[in-house]
Amino acid sequence: MEDKKKVIVYVDGFNFYYGLKSKKWKMCYWLDLVSFFNSFLKSYQELVGVNYFSARPTDAGKHDRQDKLFQANKCNPKFNLILGKYLKKEIKCRYCGGIIHSFEEKETDVRIATKILSDAYKKRCDIAIIVSADSDLIPPVELIREFNPSQKVYVYFPPNRYSSNLSNLSDGTRKLDGAFNIFKKHILPQKVQLPNGYVIERPDEWK
């Protein structure tokens, strides 16, 4: 019997989260990511990993909710969290001249590109699935085409997100706009027991 095709998923956490937010699918934030993406695979494919790229929010409440999601997903060894960071920046109001402090997410697209290229170079998978609509990810896909042309690259677009350039470069795409029922099937349990015995609960804000 022929070996199954190995699949690795690369999730742009910000693109994914804000796509869900744009649809007001709050309940879908509490998602079993490995189970969700595994549900799309064919019988001849095997999910070997879901790499989730994000950064820690500065707001305490958001940080706590995000941490619960990550801890729950880490119970599955196929889930891999890769964190970037937020950088503080100053924005000058063009009306009053006052300074507004904001935070900008950094490094995510670079970390995604680095991980995709590393896995492709080491031939860790036969199929890469990019979950993003960020056109900054076009260069690494172009490089994969050069040094590992046998690897397939698919793009899953988060809800209300799309890039025609990324789509044209891929071997196939899927839009998650109409996948609400699939999302619902892969919501994590209300309570999740961690390996250390500690139990975390789904945040009230995500119900």
Image: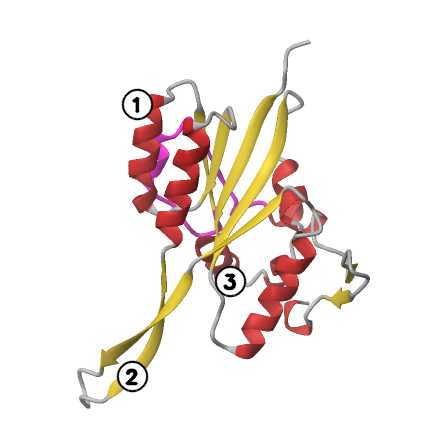
Is residue 199 magenta-colored? no
Instruction: Give the residue pinned by disc 1.
Output: 146
Q: x and y percent of residue 57 in the render?
A: 48, 70
Q: Image height check: is 203 above or below 170?
A: below
Three-letter residue code for mark 1: Glu
Residue 41 visible? The answer is no
Residue at the disc numbered 3: 21
Rendered residue at 63%/19% (across/down)? 4
Q: Alpha carbon of mark 3 to alpha carbon of mark 2: how far?
A: 24 Å
Q: Residue at x 42, y 26 (%)?
A: 171
Quarter in which the C terminus is drawn:
bottom right
Closer to us: 8 or 31: 8
Which quadrant would residue 41 be assigned to in this image?
Answer: top right
Q: According to the image, label 2 marks what residue? A: 100
Write the start and end of the magenta stretch as one range.
158-179
Percent x, y of residue 196:
78, 60
Colouring of the image = secondary structure
Q: Nearer the viewer, mark 3 or mark 1?
A: 1
> Hey, what amino acid is under mark 3?
Lys
The label number, if any, that marks residue 17 in the structure image = none
Three-letter amino acid code of the residue under disc 2:
Ile
Q: CB under 8 Å between callouts 3 and 1? A: no
Element carrying mark 3: helix
Going from N to C along the chain, the mark reached first, 3 or 2, is 3
Label 2 vs label 1, nearer the camera: 1
Q: Crowdedness of circle 1 by 10 Å Cα count: few (<14), some, many (20+)?
A: few
Q: Is residue 58 left or right of residue 149?
A: right
Q: Position of residue 115 (x, y in %)?
A: 43, 41
For the residues labelled 2 and 1, the Cα–Cα distance comes to: 44 Å
